[in-house]
Image (spheres, grey):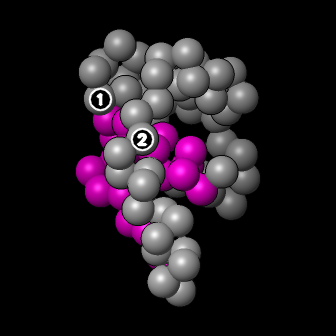
């Protein structure tokens, strides 16, 4: 699941840097392969069905919301 989450942030056009936070060498080694993982359009579409663009899961997270997060077509580096 962590690799999927990291790969999603790497594919997201609104994310300029993916920050990992391992506390152990084992965690680091398990997270690094996410840098080479590319999510295909089918997987990204499935994620968008689970968490639609602009959806806020936690009300505590409501703050400034860039357009790249709100609009599905802007949620991928390719713009598609």
- Numbered tag placed on residue 20 in the rendering: none
Residue at x 47%, y 17% (from the top left corner)? 41
Q: Which residues are magenta?
A: 2-22
Q: Which residue is identified by label 2?
A: 37
Question: Is 5 placed above or below 66 here?
Answer: below
SS assignment at label 2:
loop
Q: Dot 1: within a 10 Å radius of its alpha carbon, few (fewer than 14), some, or many (20 or more) residues?
A: few
Residue at x 55%, y 75% (from the top left corner)? 27
Question: Is 27 placed above or below 8 here?
Answer: below
Question: Is 40 placed above or below 7 here?
Answer: above
SS assignment at label 1:
loop
Q: Quadrant of the C terminus?
A: top left
Q: Is residue 73 magenta?
A: no
Q: Is residue 24 visible?
A: yes
Q: Is residue 9 visible?
A: no
**Which marked residue is nearer to the observer: mark 2 or mark 1?**
2
Residue 13 position, x and y percent, is 32, 35
Q: Is residue 14 magenta?
A: yes
Q: Which residue is identified by label 1?
A: 77
CB atoms of marks 2 and 1 within 8 Å: no
Between residue 37 and residue 61, name the one nearer to us: 37
Question: Is 13 placed above or below 20 here?
Answer: above
Q: Is residue 58 left or right of residue 72?
A: right
Between residue 22 and residue 25, name the one nearer to us: 25
């Amino acid at each position: 699941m962590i690799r999927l989450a990291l790969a999603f942030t790497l594919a997201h056009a609104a994310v300029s840097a993916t920050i990992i936070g391992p506390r152990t060498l084992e965690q680091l080694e398990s997270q690094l392969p996410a840098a080479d993982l590319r999510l295909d359009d089918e997987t990204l579409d499935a994620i968008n069905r689970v968490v639609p663009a602009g959806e806020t899961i936690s009300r505590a997270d409501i703050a400034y919301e860039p357009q790249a997060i709100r609009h599905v077509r802007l949620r991928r580096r390719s713009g598609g």
